[in-house]
Amino acid sequence: MKTIYFDNNATTKVAEEVAEEMKPFFCELYGNPSSMHTFGGQIAAKIRKSRKQVANLLGCDPAEIIFTSGGTESDNAAINGTLAAAPDKRKIITSRVEHPAVLSVCRELESCGYTVIELGVDKQGRLVRDKLEEQIDDDTTLVTIMYANNETGVVFPIEQIAELVKSKGSVFHTDAVQAVGKIPLNLAKSNIDLLSLSGHKLHAPKGVGVLYVRKGTRLSPFMLGGHQEKGRRAGTENVPGIVGLGKACELAAKNIKEENERVRKLRNKLENAILKNCPDSMLNGDKDNRLPNTSNISFEYIEGESILLMLDKYGICASSGSACASGSLEPSHVLRAMGVPFTAAHGSIRFSLSRYNTEQEVDYTIEKLPPIINRLRELSPFVAK
Ligand code: PLP
């Protein structure tokens, strides 16, 4: 059975070109980039090239790129490294809908005595910004707000937020793990100080990412040891991963507008057909300010997990809004923050597309999904018979 993969916000396929580029760095070009010999030196040159490829996609200077093990490390490093560099300040501002890679760090810091303010969102998942300005004070070290939400795809007005934070003298970090490669960025023209990205969300392998650090931003080293990454992130580099990430960024930079327009059309076709053909279904998130690839839809009165299992029988992969990975069937913290009714939050499904999806896959899903929803509703104790 063919796999139809609509779970690209969870992870993406490694692009063939990326895998090809990485191959020599396992068995042929395996030197250590820190070595003095030519064999190792050529690897250092390849890392320099990757750094440029990433910088080109982000519109920044290659010296502002630190390679990490992924989005989680970059988020942790941005928050902890900023606080460590300003030990006299004790306040952090974030949002209630951040990924756990940010939210758990902030909540841990709160338990250690920091003041943490979590800004809310409205019914459409848009950040409620009025409190931000009044909350930023002299004690605020860091404001960390995601660029785009991984569950709903809602994109926040990050450039305006960054400008406001800068005018108040605090550091601004954004978790752009879901945005990079899907939205054109130009950090040279922005006030973002720190930005996290993750390779496996943009067709590079898992276990590699980047923390962008604007020149002049104070950040304590977050991994101590050797002198790699200018002493800020020690540890022998994940060379194949870094090479792959460089190539993936080059590919993303080349076609970002055209690819995303194609993906947006496919997503819209899928979404419109589902909303039309499945009664009591509704879209979660701001329709107009969204990633082009994401659609989060609630189906009233039924469980997201049951829908996923039935889709899985047809080889269709999506994900549900429940935190099932943690073994709990609690609705997602994002949908709860949006005030999505309990009955709808439980039956939410996220479809996230990529440039590898086709119109046939969308058509196939449009055909298979409505009967699944009808069947589950017939079995549901919540539907009035
Ligand atoms: N931030 C966001 C918004 C994400 O969606 C994810 C992954 O799902 C992460 C951070 C974590 O990235 P990684 O899996 O590379 O650690």
Image: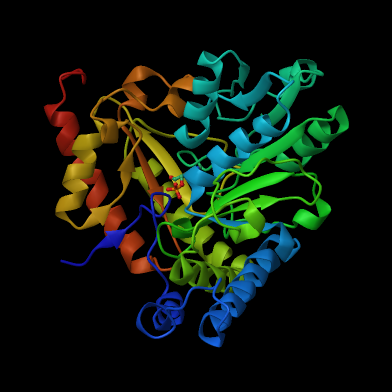
- Whether residue 157 sits left or right of residue 147 in the image: it is right
* Screen quadrant of the C terminus: top left
Which of 194/159 is in front? 194
Q: Residue at x 77, y 20 (%)?
A: 136
Q: Position of residue 11 (x, y in %)?
A: 39, 55
**Residue 323 versus residue 290 in the image, above or below:** above
Colour pattern of the rendering: rainbow
Describe residue 384's horizontal placement relative to residue 55 as left or right.
left
Q: Residue at x 36, y 26 (%)?
A: 345
Residue at the far front in the pictured view = 36
- Residue 16 position, x and y percent, is 40, 78
Q: Provide residue 125's location: percent of width, then percent of height.
A: 55, 30
Q: Quadrant of residue 162?
A: top right
**Which residue occupies the foreground of this view, 363 or 298?**
298
Between 18 and 111, which is closer to the camera in this rendering?
A: 111
Asked whether residue 289 appears in the rendered view, the answer is no
Task: Please say if 227 is above or below 318.
Answer: below
Residue 314: image x %, image y %? 17, 56
Which residue: 23% across, 43% down? 308
Apparent side of residue 139 relative to residue 182 in the rendered image (left or right): right
Residue with the most extreme right position: 167
Which quadrant: the N terminus? bottom left
Q: Residue at x 50, y 57 (%)?
A: 235
On the question of residue 53 being in view, the answer is yes
